[in-house]
Image (spheres, rainbow, N blue to C red):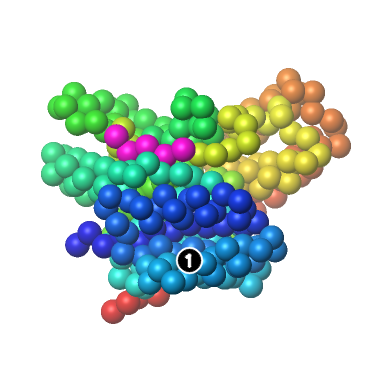
């Protein structure tokens, strides 16, 4: 019951995708399948992937249009579920896992579940940046009793949410909670999903499972850093998180998030024209409340 499908979502990043796939295919605990979701790339990614098709484990899904990270992960997870995978191991196309990253996730999750006496909805890796330090973009949120397993000698902590950079998701989680929200397109889709599934039980971060996230700069999400080039991403982030805070938490949570966004932009002296775009995105989050889809049954 340990058949793993690795899922890599890519869009116009052939310069890093090959390194990702080489790391995934060389794992000490080999995945049964490697599902590569190509979000309609235009940079020659299809030519790169052609060189991997000789490996029977590699399955390429080329989508007709770019559906964003959320749509790509939903498509890949649905495919892995239909293949009969017991676990889905998902990651970005610039994530380089250590050789034993998957093995440590599988073993760490099994040990934690045996100790706690219940199933856990996911296990994530420690995500480092290229300089060996922690990756600011990918820090999970810990629970109030985060050190429960650590105190028993296990190299793992309890978490309430994480990013989609090396996350192991058991099959039952997808069957019960469905797929990431494709309507989110990009940003906050991973937060929403892991918050959704931890309604069953806390997630797990396995401290011995390590990956490197090859981002251009080691920065977290900061609405004070909006500019003409990245504002489109922040628009999705503002709409998606506003929707989540309002519809899944409370109007007070929505108001608190809106205040943090506005305060961050003011402190960062973001141009007024860009601030207006973000305010409109916050307002779009009010009627926006998508529902999760589920994979087709393999039965």
Answer few, some or many: residues within 10 Å of disc 1's Cα (few below 14, many 20 plus, some between 14 and 19): some
What segment carries the magenta color? 208-212
Q: What is the quadrant of residue 261 in the picture?
A: top right
Image coordinates of residue 57 in percent, x first then y, are 37, 68
Q: Position of residue 276 (x, y in %)?
A: 81, 38
Q: As drawn, is 91 to the left or to the right of 99?
A: right
Furthest-top residue in this view: 267
Establish if 234 lies above or below 3.
above
* Left or right of 243 on screen, residue 192: left
Query: Image point 50% across, 50% down: which residue?
Result: 19
Residue 209 sits inside the magenta stretch = yes
On the image, the x and y values in percent for residue 202 come to 30, 40
Secondary structure beneath dot 1 equals loop
Q: Inspect this view and state whether residue 290 appears.
A: no
Q: Nearer the viewer, residue 102 or 185?
A: 102
- Examine the structure image and report whether residue 81 is included in the region drawn in magenta: no
Q: Position of residue 207 (x, y in %)?
A: 31, 32
């Amino acid at each position: 019951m340990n058949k793993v499908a690795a899922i890599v979502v890519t869009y116009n990043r052939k310069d890093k995708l090959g390194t990702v796939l080489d790391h995934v295919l060389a794992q000490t605990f080999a995945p049964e399948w490697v599902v590569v979701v190509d979000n309609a790339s235009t940079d020659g990614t299809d030519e790169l992937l052609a060189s991997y098709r000789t490996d029977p484990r590699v399955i390429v899904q080329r989508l007709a249009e770019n559906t964003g990270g959320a749509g790509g992960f939903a498509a890949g997870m649905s495919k892995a579920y239909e293949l009969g995978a017991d676990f889905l191991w998902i990651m970005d196309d610039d994530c380089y896992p250590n050789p034993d990253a998957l093995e440590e996730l599988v073993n760490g999750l099994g040990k934690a579940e045996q100790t706690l006496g219940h199933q856990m909805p996911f296990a994530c890796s420690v995500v480092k940046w290229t300089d060996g330090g922690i990756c600011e973009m990918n820090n999970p949120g810990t629970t109030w009793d985060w050190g429960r397993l650590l105190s028993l000698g296990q190299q793992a902590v309890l978490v309430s949410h994480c990013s989609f950079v090396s996350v192991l998701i058991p099959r039952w989680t997808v069957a019960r909670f469905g797929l990431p929200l494709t309507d989110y397109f990009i940003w906050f889709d991973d937060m929403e999903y892991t918050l959704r599934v931890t309604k069953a039980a806390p997630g797990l971060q396995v401290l011995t499972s390590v990956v490197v996230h090859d981002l251009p700069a080691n920065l977290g999400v900061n609405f004070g850093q909006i500019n003409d080039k990245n504002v489109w991403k922040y628009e999705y982030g503002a709409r998606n998180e506003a929707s989540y805070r309002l519809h899944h938490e409370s109007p007070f949570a929505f108001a608190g998030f809106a205040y943090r966004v506005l305060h961050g932009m003011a402190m960062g002296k973001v141009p007024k024209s860009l601030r207006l775009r973000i305010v409109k995105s916050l307002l779009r989050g009010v009627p926006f409340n998508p529902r999760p889809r589920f994979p087709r049954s393999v039965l």
